[in-house]
Amino acid sequence: MKKLKIFETFAGYGGGSFALKKAEIPFECVGYSEISPLPIKCYDQNHPNIKNYGDISKIDFKDIPNFDLLTGGFPCQDVSFNGKQDLKKGRTVLVFNLIDCLKVKKPKYFLFENVSGIYSNKFKDFLIDVVLQFADCGYNVYHTMLNSSQFGVKQNRDRVWFVGIRKDIQFKFRFPEPTHPKINLITVDGKNGMCKNKKQQLDRVYLLSSGISCLTHSFSKRMVFDGEKTRELTKEEYCKFMGFEDGEIDVSDLSTNQVSSLMGNGWDVNLVSKIFKNLLENWENHTQANPTDLSFNKDLTEFNKLNSQMTLQVTSLNPNIMRNFCLRKNLKSPETINIHTPTYVGDKK
Ligand SMILES: C[S@@+](CC[C@H](N)C(=O)[O-])C[C@H]1O[C@@H](n2cnc3c(N)ncnc32)[C@H](O)[C@@H]1O
């Protein structure tokens, strides 16, 4: 069987590679991009002999061998409810480097990820601009928010997933359907709701058997009651709450603090393996049509066709984004443009 070639950006511990292994899709990683020492150490230990191309903003994508799948959980701090929610900080906008990579390498597929804050009203214009630019690179784009607990991992982890399929590839994607009810978090002292800081989070003690709140990079330590005593999660438990089976990831050289912070930033490999199964299980047989015509569909009907569950009227957006978009597309100001918009699992109409 032909190996799928991947390039893993914002690689962390390599959630994309782990999930492909779990989904039993043969693959070869042509390289990764990561700048922080701890994720690099963990990545190299678990996926040896893969070249790190370093800072994505400095990569000349022409230097990278061709690949079929681009992955990237681009930084979330600037849209996260736990942060300052300010795009000017310059981290979440690194998504535009993914867009540059798509333009140069034109892989067949991509999977990108971010936090639920990117779906908030504050970032509506940004989200739509980004999705339109993905599409503009020649991709049919699907995005939605999924909660890890609805796929079998007992963590209340909402993440937004963006799947792109190059337009010449004749394949209609569907996100996996939930297999479990959404988690009902139980704290020993009855405290609930979102924690505003580390101290509040550390004061919460979750009943281990009922599951934990969302692990994040900044508040990653979790206290649990295991039936006998109150304690911090072990390294192995942190990994389990990100979808790893025993022994699937080697974190033996790392401290508990290091593991919890890596996991807080990582991909739930159980959920991602399900997304990959739906997208790539049969990728070699996806037929290609008209491979040279990757141009954007001027009247945007493709967006409308893709998903009619919920639509958003783009004319209500920031006029500058609208004007630039129309200029780029050579469009007369259209009355409305419907795009393939967020669909929340459980809220489908
Ligand atoms: C949300 S995490 C992604 C985690 C990853 N998906 C995983 O499975 O562990 C974002 C990662 O991007 C890395 N990063 C931030 N800026 C970067 C840059 N300019 N170039 C490459 N990586 C970067 C961070 O160090 C962090 O590990």
Image: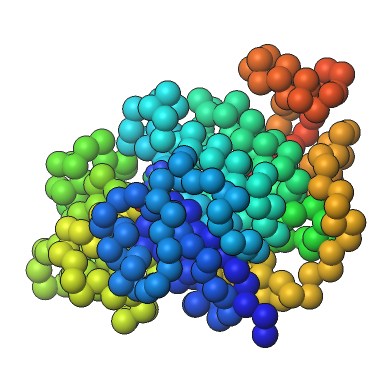
Left or right of residue 222: residue 193? right
User: Residue 235: x percent and y percent?
Assistant: 21, 69
Left or right of residue 26: residue 269? left
Which quarter of the figure is the N terminus placed in? Answer: bottom right
70 is higher (above) or lower (below) than 318: below
Residue found at x 67% / y 75%: 281
User: Residue 224: x percent and y percent?
Assistant: 19, 62
325 is higher (above) or lower (below) than 288: above
Residue found at x 14% / y 47%: 203
User: Residue 20: x percent and y percent?
Assistant: 53, 72
| Rendered image quadrant of residue 41 | bottom left
Which residue is most to the front? 63
248 is higher (above) or lower (below) than 96: below
User: Residue 311: x percent and y percent?
Assistant: 73, 36
The answer to whether any part of residue 220 appears in the image is yes
Left or right of residue 238: residue 231? left
